[in-house]
């Protein structure tokens, strides 16, 4: 597998603004790490089921009932931008 | 009162129960130790004396009123990744500076109900990503045995506080070795419970298919006492299993007779420090002399564990840390022009280099065109690693291995070579992938005086077994 990791593009997917220096540094570091983890490509995994979790267990279901939860003011208390009752964001839809 | 440096959980609980000292006296003594030592060790991110003494006074009042909660008045330090209502939970990240938790993690609620005094927040690698506690955004914690060395990580603050005489016990979290390895580096006991044994609700998530909470203590008995209070089913963490929680401490028989100890040959390799291998093998020999049977065995997929781990853990981290968007809590960039800038700049400013690197690696292995080659394959390779252990535990009761290939290394020594740090997790990561339990306890030291840890691994939900064997070895080691 070729190792042309487009770090700038992946960082955009991850929503992390990188400086030019960080992009360059991560490029080299990630290529070294990905080069190493590529060793799993040598394993014969035919017919092997994936392990999703540390313990093999099936889904747990519970009754769909209302339980106590955080109050609105508690849930908003750590928000950097908020009104009395909502989280605030920059404008998403441009003016026409 | 004995020196805090020597005081175990068991001894503390006896002293409190017999009114030899009050929780306030104990907590004050502990604060004095922290005052005297933490300027050098830097194990704690936050110690709020008033908050600690207030809880201790409440515990003393409860005892005076006849309350007999199992851990009443016992101070326990918490890794700064565990939510306690009204307290900060920085995850050693700029991202979470100023955050105040609106709720208790399940482990915090359980400890609160058991009467614990929350005694300070310990330093860690940022968001638990690291093996040396050097990725903390705030400070470098030092190894109590040599101040120029790292304490290990990511629960390095908890390990340094316990081993350095600044805590009676502490909680940490272990995703790929983050309890066991710092316990080994600092010379204390660290228990990673089986996946599903302890709830993670309210514990900031790194890699959810691997994360576990566990105790760092001065003795195996202490780990057993605390695990009983931490373990159990939690409706708020669907991965916890509804399996009865035994009184682990009462099951410490001290008996080594007939115990079948497996030695996986992949854990005794050329690349390890010979002093580490020798110390572990000498511990194994002491167990054999006390009646244990030694079983040579193989875990053939061990060499793939680090690759599998760094794919899965970082993929999960990239998803878990997507929640830090600068909107609901956490750092927000100044005057964002657009929602994209709000996200990308808040995250750029809030996260440190190691966290960014792991999120980007995780995003890469999950991205279109690479998912099957990395994430899908790693999940299947994980099955092979898990099955290695299942097979091996048919012929042994526990396994004994080194915790890490080396003792603690110098601060700054490994930060330039990432792959080298990652490979240092080679003996702890496989058990995490397999979801089994493991405990690290001291078994010797290097000629430089740095502690060496012995890892005792057991099958899933085999905590009684590893605690009992570890306790039996502890008695042999100490000539008790």
Image (cartoon, coloured by chain):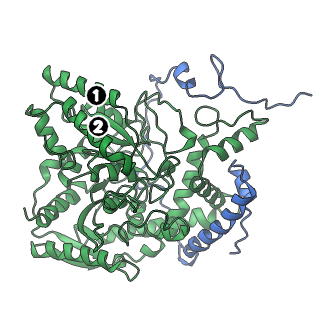
Chain colours: A blue, B green
Residue B93 in the image: x percent, y percent?
53, 44
Q: Is residue B331 left or right of residue A70?
A: right
Report the side of B123 relative to A76 (left or right). left
Secondary element under disc 2, as helix, strand or loop, is helix
Q: Mark 2, residues whose alpha carbon is within 10 Å: few (<14), some, or many (≥20)?
A: many
Tell me the quarter of the picture where residue A59 sits: top left
Quadrant showing the C terminus of chain B: bottom left
Instruction: Tell me: residue B309, above or below residue B244.
Output: below
Residue, disc 1: B53
Chain ID at mark 1: B
**Residue situated in front as seen by the camera: B471 or B22:** B22
Of labels 1 and 2, earlier in sequence is: 2
Which residue is under mark 2?
B31
For numbered disc 1, what is the local secondary structure?
helix
Confirm whether residue B244 shows in the render: no
User: Which quadrant is the N terminus of chain B positioned in?
Assistant: top left
Residue B279 placement, left or right of A30: left
- Decide: is A15 above or below B20: below
The residue located at (24%, 33%) in the rendering is B28
Residue B197, position as x, y percentages in the image = 33, 48
């Amino acid at each position: 597998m070729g190792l042309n990791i487009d770090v700038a593009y992946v960082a955009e997917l991850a929503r992390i603004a990188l400086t030019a220096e960080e992009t360059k540094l991560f490029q080299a570091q990630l290529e070294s790490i990905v080069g190493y983890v590529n060793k799993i490509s040598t394993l014969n995994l035919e017919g092997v089921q994936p392990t999703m979790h540390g313990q093999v267990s099936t889904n747990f279901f519970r009754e769909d009932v209302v339980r106590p939860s955080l109050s609105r003011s508690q849930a908003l208390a750590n928000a950097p931008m908020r009104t009395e009752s909502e989280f605030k964001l920059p404008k998403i839809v441009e003016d026409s | 009162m004995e020196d805090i440096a020597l005081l175990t959980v068991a001894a503390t609980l006896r002293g409190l129960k017999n009114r030899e000292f009050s929780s306030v006296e104990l907590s004050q003594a502990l604060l004095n130790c922290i005052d005297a030592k933490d300027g050098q060790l830097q194990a704690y991110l936050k110690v709020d004396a008033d908050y600690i003494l207030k809880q201790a006074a409440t515990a003393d009042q409860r005892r005076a009123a006849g309350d007999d909660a199992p851990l009443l008045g016992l101070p326990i330090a918490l890794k700064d990744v565990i939510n306690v209502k009204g307290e900060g939970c920085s995850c050693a990240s700029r991202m979470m500076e100023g955050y105040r938790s609106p709720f208790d993690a399940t482990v915090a609620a359980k400890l609160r109900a058991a009467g614990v005094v929350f005694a300070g927040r310990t330093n860690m690698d940022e968001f638990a990503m690291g093996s040396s506690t050097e990725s903390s955004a705030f400070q470098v914690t030092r190894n109590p045995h040599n101040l120029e060395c790292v304490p290990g990580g990511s629960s390095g603050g908890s390990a340094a506080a316990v081993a350095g005489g600044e805590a009676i016990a502490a909680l940490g979290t272990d995703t790929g070795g983050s309890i066991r390895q710092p316990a080994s580096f600092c010379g204390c006991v660290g228990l990673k419970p089986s996946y599903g044994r302890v709830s993670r609700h309210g514990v900031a998530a790194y890699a959810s298919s691997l994360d576990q909470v566990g105790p760092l203590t001065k003795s195996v008995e202490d780990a057993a006492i605390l695990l009983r209070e931490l373990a159990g089913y939690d409706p708020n963490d669907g991965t916890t299993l509804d399996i009865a929680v035994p009184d682990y401490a009462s099951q410490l028989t001290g008996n080594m007779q007939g115990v079948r100890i497996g030695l996986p040959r992949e854990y005794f390799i050329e690349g390890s420090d010979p002093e580490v291998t020798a110390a572990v093998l000498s511990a194994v020999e002491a167990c054999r002399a006390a009646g244990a049977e030694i079983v040579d065995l193989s875990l053939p997929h061990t060499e793939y564990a680090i690759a599998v781990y760094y794919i899965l853990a970082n993929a999960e981290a990239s998803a878990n840390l997507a929640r830090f968007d600068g909107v609901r809590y956490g750092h927000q960039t100044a005057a964002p022009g657009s929602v994209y800038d709000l996200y990308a700049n808040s995250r750029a400013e809030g996260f440190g280099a190691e966290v960014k690197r792991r999120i980007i690696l995780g995003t890469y292995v999950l991205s279109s065109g690479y998912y099957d080659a990395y994430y899908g394959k790693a999940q299947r390779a994980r099955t092979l690693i898990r099955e290695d252990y299942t097979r091996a535990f048919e012929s042994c009761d526990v396994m004994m291995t080194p915790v890490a290939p080396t003792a603690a290394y110098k601060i700054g020594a490994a930060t330039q070579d990432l792959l080298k740090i990652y490979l240092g997790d080679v003996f702890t990561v496989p058990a995490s992938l397999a979801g089994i339990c493991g405990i690290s306890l001291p078994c010797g030291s290097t000629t430089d005086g740095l502690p060496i840890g012995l890892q005792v691994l057991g099958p899933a939900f085999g905590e009684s077994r590893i605690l009992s064997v570890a306790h039996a070895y502890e008695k042999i080691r100490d000539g008790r």
